[in-house]
Image (cartoon, rainbow, N blue to C red):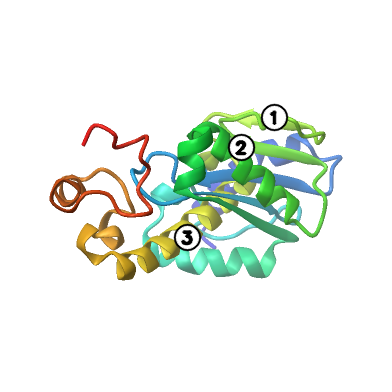
Amino acid sequence: MKSEEYERLTKMMEYEHKYDEYDYICGVDEAGRGPLAGPVVAAAVILPKDCYIEYLNDSKKVPEKRREALYKEIHNRAIAVGTGIVSSDVIDEINVLNATYKAMKEALSKLDTKPQVILADAVCIPDISVPQESIIRGDAKSVSIAAASIIAKVTRDRMMYEYDEMYPEYGFARHKGYGTRFHMDALKRYGQCPIHRKTYIHFL
């Protein structure tokens, strides 16, 4: 590992070192709050102390092939990984913020090891007993949150590729459900499919 990468990752451990008294620090993040279709996916990841995973970063800053490689490495090296998935129907029913909280709680419930503190990306998860800190742009500032960001993003992208095979006319493999021009044109031409969020596209 190059010294520059080592220094970058060390800087991203600032929040983890803030809670050095804990052995099980959990990063939590989500993917899919903004798209017009598909689920919101959350991940919870507990890494070992001072776990250096080369190129780990906010999933939006990592190319897809590297995200896939990081996904495997995180699963191999993490103490525990949990994911939570909330469908578009539930998003319509309870709104996307509450759906995000629901997905995060589900991800936490699937951890084999109970976290002692939670670092969450820009949210404070309600109704949980574990101490937590909300960090703005945490996926670029904390290795634990970055790891959760990668797991959530890859998990959701894989789902959207499957949906693309089911509903090829919408191009989900290309845009993952976001409101691109291609997606909007497909919506106008074909209408909604079962994974579209009706509360997001009621204007069509």
Q: Position of residue 131 (x, y in %)?
A: 79, 32
Q: Which residue is mark 3?
A: 154
Q: Is residue 100 left or right of residue 202?
A: right
| Relative vertical location of residue 95 with respect to residue 57 in this rendering, above or below | above
Residue 10 visible within the image: no
Secondary element at image label 1: loop
The 10 Å Cα crowd at callout 2, few under 14, some 14 to 19, many 20 or more, is many
Q: Which mark is residue 13?
A: none
**Quarter of the image that includes the N terminus:** bottom right
| Relative vertical location of residue 3 with respect to residue 76 in this rendering, above or below | above
Q: Residue at x 74, y 51 (%)?
A: 109
Asked if the residue at tag 1 contacts the one at tag 2, i.e. Cβ–Cβ closer than 8 Å, the answer is yes
| First-in-chain label (2 vs 1) | 2
In the rendered image, which quarter is residue 72 located in? bottom right
| First-in-chain label (2 vs 3) | 2
Q: Amino acid at mark 2?
A: Tyr
Q: Which residue is mark 1?
A: 126
How far apart are labels 3 and 1 at the CA level? 25 Å
Q: Amino acid at mark 3?
A: Val
Q: Which residue is mark 2?
A: 101
Q: Is residue 189 left or right of residue 29?
A: left
Q: Residue at x 81, y 40 (%)?
A: 20
